[in-house]
Image (spheres, rainbow, N blue to C red):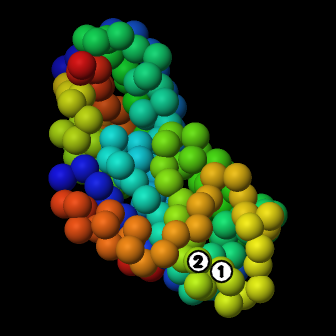
Amino acid sequence: MNNFGINLTRSTDDPDRATVAMTIANASVASGKNTMVFLSSEGVRLAIKGVAEGIHEEGLQPMADLVKNYVAAGGAIWVCSPCFKKRGYSESDLIESAILVGGAKLVEFMTNDASGVSY
Amino acid sequence: METSIHADSILDLGEKGCGQLVMEVMLAMRNLAEGQTLLITAYDPAVPTDLAAWCRMTGNTLVKILPDPAGKQFLLRKGR
């Protein structure tokens, strides 16, 4: 089993939880797993340009570093399309490494022998 | 008791742990050839279990934890 999915529903509303999720994402991709972070609900804001740079929970790695290292190591960031649109964002707001996806894409990934965690 | 150990590369991770630790270990191991060794210094209490799991997942070997009471040094050998 090499697929590992992380569902993250938090961002600026809960920097502690969001940072821990991205820390685990770093551990997964650095361990050779095909890793995907699915940003849903408030989590989608992490995929907006400039947002990660504003999150640095005390005692944890800065969010911008976590995202940069995760993407550089091959990690994927998928953004819940309806959650994104509901918040009034457009594709031009997205960081370069993130893509908008719908539920079918998530289901396909998770049913392909994946395991995962949710924050 | 062994007082010194040969390693092809060294990595001091201080108090780093979890995802940050294994990310930096992965990057350091990329610079080594198969069979070469990396000596890691790290103080996070979860490092022994994390490095052992990381090695099992990535085909590398945790050769030894040096006989330090705090378990602060770890010798890894790069696999294929």
Q: Is disc 1 placed on a helix, strand or loop? A: helix
Q: Is residue B47 left or right of residue B24?
A: left
To which residue does mark 2 refer?
A: A81
To which residue does mark 1 refer?
A: A84
Task: Please name the residue shown 54% across and 60% down the image.
Answer: A77
In space, the residues marked 2 and 1 are separated at their CA atoms by 5 Å
* Residue B32: percent from left, percent from top: 40, 14
* Callout 2 touching callout 1 (CB < 8 Å): yes
* Above or below for B61 versus A88: above
Q: Amino acid at mark 1?
A: Phe
Q: Is residue A62 or residue B43 the one in the foreground?
A: A62
Task: Please name the residue shown 32% across and 63% down the image.
Answer: A109
Q: Is residue B9 or residue A49 the one in the foreground?
A: A49
Q: Check the picture and name the quadrant holding the N terminus of chain B.
A: top left
Density class for disc 2 (Cα within 10 Å; few <14, some 14-19, many ≥20) is: some
* Residue A18: percent from left, percent from top: 56, 74
Q: Amino acid at mark 2?
A: Ser
Density class for disc 1 (Cα within 10 Å; few <14, some 14-19, many ≥20) is: many
